[in-house]
Image: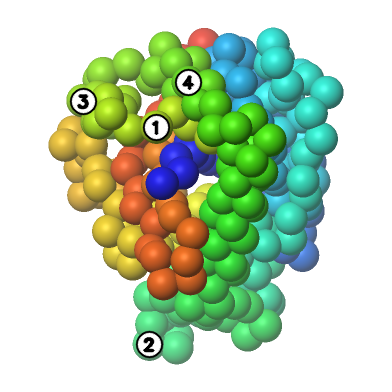
């Protein structure tokens, strides 16, 4: 069995976020001043975490966020970021550039409700889910392949305990699991992966974890928090257990979801 940590962060605030304007993929605006502060605060919060892999959506707001996080990190300042279009926000078609209330009005006119409604030219929830599944499956295969190569060349030497740096900043508390590592006999983490993406995409990915992969959850997490969109630079952490073989389904433990402790000192810019 190969274990790795997956830390997922939503991008920082943009002016359109604040004004409740749909961005999707076609409207690609930069972070606001508050958004840059949030990215820096997330970076400071995560500065002692030694990430082995970094992935980001290739849209501007996520690129700026991941840069803001990494430049504060003690170990990963010069790490190469893998920009992946599969991590892009849900495409909202003709609704992009319009205020959220207009999207909701379009949904009502069609006899549907958000987020299930798909505006013309947009992606369905199933299409977004498939993008998330494809990315996650390829990530598991990458970690399994690299773990196998390390074992081959290190003659089975145990992996370093990468979870130590994570456990120090995600203590027991609200939204967190009672223990970071539920099984002390489990092997050390083979990798620690950072992913920076978008709110609607992350909600779809987390729903896939919960519904399809039966992700275990912290007892303190409420049902409303499970289905809510992550706040800007909200942080969620998962421990993934995977094995070789196409028929072997990964198991997932949610350590915490949508943590925003780092935002307490961020002041919004008018």
Check if mark 3's residue and mark 1's residue have beta carbons within 8 Å.
no
Within 10 Å of disc 4 (Cα), the crowding (few <14, some 14-19, many 20+) is few
Mark 2 or mark 4, which has the lower sequence index? 2
Secondary structure found at label 4: loop
Q: Quadrant of the C terminus?
A: top right
Q: In 3D space, how far apart are the residues under numbered discs 4 and 1 (Cα atoms)?
A: 9 Å
Mark 3 or mark 1, which has the lower sequence index? 3
Q: In 3D space, how far apart are the residues under numbered discs 2 and 4 (Cα atoms)?
A: 52 Å
Task: Please provide percent x and percent y for residue 178.
Answer: 21, 25
In front: 54, or 114?
54
Secondary structure found at label 3: loop
What's the residue at 64%, 30% (across, down)? 154
Left or right of 82 on screen, residue 145 = left
Q: Which residue is mark 1?
A: 187
Check if mark 3's residue and mark 4's residue have beta carbons within 8 Å.
no
Q: Mark 4 or mark 1: which is in front?
A: 1
Q: Mark 2 or mark 4: which is in front?
A: 4
Q: In 3D space, how far apart are the residues under numbered discs 2 and 1 (Cα atoms)?
A: 51 Å
Residue 178 circle label? 3
Task: Please provide percent x and percent y for residue 235.
Answer: 48, 33
Q: In 3D space, how far apart are the residues under numbered discs 3 and 1 (Cα atoms)?
A: 19 Å
């Amino acid at each position: 069995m190969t274990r790795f940590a997956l830390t997922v962060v939503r991008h920082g605030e943009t002016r359109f976020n604040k004004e409740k304007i749909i961005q999707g993929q076609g409207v690609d605006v930069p972070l606001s001043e508050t958004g840059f502060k949030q990215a820096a605060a997330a970076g400071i919060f995560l500065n002692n975490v030694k990430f082995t892999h970094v992935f980001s959506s290739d849209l501007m707001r996520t690129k700026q966020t991941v840069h803001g996080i990494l430049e504060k990190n003690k170990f990963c300042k010069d790490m190469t970021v893998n920009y992946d279009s599969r991590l892009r926000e849900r495409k909202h078609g003709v609704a992009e550039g319009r205020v959220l209330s207009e999207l909701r009005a379009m949904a009502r006119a069609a006899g549907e409700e958000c987020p299930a409604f798909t505006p013309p030219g947009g992606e369905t929830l199933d299409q977004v889910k498939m993008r998330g599944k494809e990315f996650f499956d390829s990530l598991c295969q990458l970690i399994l392949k690299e773990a196998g190569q390390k074992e081959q060349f290190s003659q089975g030497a145990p992996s370093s305990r990468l979870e130590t740096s994570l456990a120090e900043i995600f203590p027991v508390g609200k939204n967190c699991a009672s223990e970071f590592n539920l099984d002390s006999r489990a092997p050390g983490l083979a990798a620690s992966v950072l992913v920076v993406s978008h709110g609607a995409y992350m909600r779809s990915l987390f729903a896939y974890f919960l519904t399809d992969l039966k992700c275990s959850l912290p007892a303190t997490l409420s049902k409303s928090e499970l289905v809510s969109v992550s706040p800007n630079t909200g942080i969620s952490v998962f421990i993934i257990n995977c094995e070789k073989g196409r028929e072997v389904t990964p198991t997932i433990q949610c350590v915490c979801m949508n943590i925003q402790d780092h935002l307490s000192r961020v002041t919004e810019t008018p």
